Image: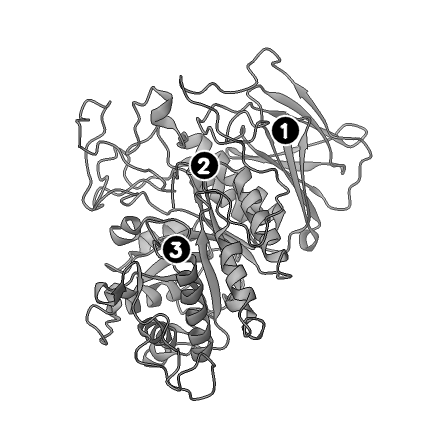
């Protein structure tokens, strides 16, 4: 999440009542409790019903956006809430849950790269010890901002009372900063972030004991295990056990490489386990910029211009693969970044017509980051000249498909298998609906034939183009034809991956009580195709990421190895 993305926008829960309670407006949408979209709405201007509908019709149950401290407190000691009041009210009336991010230091509270007063005692009695009716220390400016924000937007808080909202309406999940392990967002020290999180946790719980505090979404742009370094600090804190180690959940971010969604989830789980901790893990940013659609570099013929980018179709594949990987590893929720292209990672007002690259001049911005489920409208602040404004990309169909099939009910007994390095098979059980769901795709450049023992008299095969009923052979074996992957120019993969994103995923929904004894069999149908994508001349293949069973050393600080960051 780049700040410009949030700053310059233009613009699932189930079918049962959302946790905020039912609104007075008819709500025909399924709001998945495990799927969200970032930047459905913004604070700068009212969000249109059309923009909300674009997200809700896909099955999103969560919205994620930042609440900037420097905008709320433009003058020291004076809070202005109008823009965020409107934003919170709009989301809640649409039945959306909110993952709000607290970030953005006012310039007058700067202390080098850190925050003035952050190390001051939290409470006026000179301690960090919470207690009933304790007042805050006015010299800890971050503590006062957090307390004021939670008090205003918590369920039954100040805004709820001013508007006579139904019981339970408000924000209950607060993320403390965004990507603190990525210098453009947090350039202060790990120790400073540990203090930031601790202060926020204690103050938030003082305001609302039921609120949930999230460790800021980690990008892991280097090999530095930022979470382990913060936990190592808390290990020496005599009050950490009494206060849940100052976090209720941990978030991670992943772009362009689906497998990494599972790896990051597992890495966080194992890092926590090193301290005998367990916390829900959220993948609350995921996606990839496309190159073959405006405002991307549609003329890009050279591999370097496509690095870390995907085609429209590959982006749809990415979302299904990444989400299945994450859920199978135990991620609690998955968010896609983002609803519209908005301004991507580019400055305010960036705009240009579609071209074949002839408008590109040294120093000019002639393409942008197209992350959106939807292309920008012609009234957008940035990238406003798409010939099909406001239309959905294929990834929107992928999101809707995952919401329809996986968005509600329980998911149990996940398994992930890489069969002969040719295909990925991920399965889930949905006991509430007597279903076993398989997500499968080719992980090589050739088409493959998958013989899947799912059993039953029939099953439903879902693709991005629709669904059909298929039947097995006499032994309960379903034969599926999987299209090969295409090169996506993501060079930072494991050695066994031919590309970052696999081929078109298929989803098979079979009866849960069906059984079959045969093994999964995969056959390569085009054996003469190359086994790896070729990268641009002169590029050295970087070291492979760790295997899918990392064992992070709790207090280690690995040597940082910079890798390009496609989103964040």
Q: Name the residue under label 3.
A: 178
Does residue 83 appear in this view? no
- Reading the chain from its start, which is encountered first: label 2 or label 1? 2
Q: Is residue 418 above or below residue 446?
A: below
Compute the Cα span from label 2 to label 3.
Answer: 19 Å
SS at mark 3 in the image: loop
Can you give x and y, in whole percent of width and height, for residue 394 in the image? 43, 36
Q: Mark 2 points at which residue?
A: 256
Left or right side of 154 for 75:
left
- Reading the chain from its start, which is encountered first: label 3 or label 1? 3
| Closer to the camera in the image, 288 or 525 | 288
What's the residue at 37%, 53% (across, down)? 53
**Mark number, residue 324:** none
Does residue 557 appear in this view? yes
Q: Is residue 96 above or below residue 518?
A: below
Crowding at label 3, few (<14), some or many (≥20) Cα neighbours within 10 Å? Answer: many
Compute the Cα span from label 2 to label 1.
Answer: 19 Å
SS at mark 2 in the image: loop
The answer to which image quadrant residue 453 occupies is: top right
Compute the Cα span from label 3 to label 1.
Answer: 35 Å
What's the residue at 55%, 15% (across, down)? 530
Can you give x and y, in whole percent of width and height, for residue 181 in the image? 42, 51
Q: Mark 1 points at which residue?
A: 423
Crowding at label 1, few (<14), some or many (≥20) Cα neighbours within 10 Å? Answer: many
SS at mark 1 in the image: strand
Can you give x and y, in whole percent of width and height, for residue 552 in the image? 59, 48
């Amino acid at each position: 999440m780049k700040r410009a993305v949030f700053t310059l926008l233009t613009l699932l829960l189930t079918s049962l009542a959302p946790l905020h309670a039912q609104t007075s407006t008819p709500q025909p949408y399924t709001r998945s409790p495990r799927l969200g979209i970032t930047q459905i709405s913004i604070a700068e201007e009212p969000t249109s019903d059309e923009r909300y509908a674009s997200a809700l019709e896909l099955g999103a149950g969560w919205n994620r956006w930042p609440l900037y401290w420097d905008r709320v407190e433009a003058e020291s000691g004076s809070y202005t809430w109008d823009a965020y009041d409107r934003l919170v009210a709009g989301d809640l009336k649409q039945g959306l849950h909110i993952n709000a991010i607290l970030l953005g230091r006012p310039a007058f509270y700067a202390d080098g790269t850190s925050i003035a007063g952050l190390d001051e005692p939290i409470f006026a009695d000179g301690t960090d010890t919470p207690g009933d009716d304790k007042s805050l220390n006015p010299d800890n400016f971050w503590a006062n901002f957090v307390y004021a924000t939670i008090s205003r937007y918590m369920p039954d808080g100040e805004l709820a009372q001013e508007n006579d909202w139904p019981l339970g309406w408000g924000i209950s999940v607060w993320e403390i900063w965004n990507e603190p392990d990525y210098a453009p967002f947090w350039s202060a020290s790990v120790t400073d972030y540990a203090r930031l999180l601790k202060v926020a946790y204690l103050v938030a719980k003082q305001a609302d004991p039921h609120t949930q505090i999230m460790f800021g979404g980690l990008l892991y742009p280097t090999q530095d295990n930022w979470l382990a370094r913060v936990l190592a600090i808390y290990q020496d804190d005599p009050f950490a056990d009494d206060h849940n180690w100052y976090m209720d959940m941990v978030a991670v971010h992943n772009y362009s490489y689906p497998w990494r969604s599972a790896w990051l989830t597992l890495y966080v789980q194992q890092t926590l386990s090193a301290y005998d901790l367990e916390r829900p893990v959220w993948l609350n940013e995921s996606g990839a910029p496309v190159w073959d659609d405006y405002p991307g570099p549609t003329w890009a013929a050279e591999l370097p211009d496509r690095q870390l980018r995907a085609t429209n179709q590959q982006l749809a594949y990415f979302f299904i693969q990444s989400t299945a990987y994450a859920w199978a590893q135990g991620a609690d929720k998955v968010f896609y970044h983002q609803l519209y292209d908005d301004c991507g990672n580019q400055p305010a007002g960036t705009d240009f017509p579609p071209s074949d690259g002839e408008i590109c001049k040294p120093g000019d911005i002639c393409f942008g980051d197209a992350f959106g489920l939807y292309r920008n409208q012609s009234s957008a602040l940035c990238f406003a000249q798409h010939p099909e404004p406001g239309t959905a990309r294929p990834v929107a169909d992928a999101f809707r498909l995952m919401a329809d099939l996986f968005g509600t009910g329980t998911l149990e007994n996940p398994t992930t298998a890489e069969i002969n390095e040719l295909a990925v098979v991920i399965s889930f059980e949905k006991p509430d609906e007597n279903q076993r769901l398989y997500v499968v795709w080719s992980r090589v450049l050739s088409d493959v034939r998958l013989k899947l023992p799912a059993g039953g008299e029939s099953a439903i095969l879902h693709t991005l183009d629709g669904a059909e009923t298929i039947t097995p052979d006499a032994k309960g074996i379903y034969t599926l034809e999987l299209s090969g992957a295409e090169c996506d120019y993501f060079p930072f993969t494991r050695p066994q991956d031919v590309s970052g994103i696999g081929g078109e995923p298929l989803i098979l929904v079979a009866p849960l009580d069906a059984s079959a004894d045969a093994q999964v069999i995969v056959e390569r149908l085009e054996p003469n195709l190359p086994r790896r994508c070729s990268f641009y001349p002169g590029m050295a293949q970087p070291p492979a990421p760790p295997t899918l069973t990392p064992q992070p050393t709790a207090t280690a600080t690995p040597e940082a190895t910079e890798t390009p960051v496609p989103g964040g």
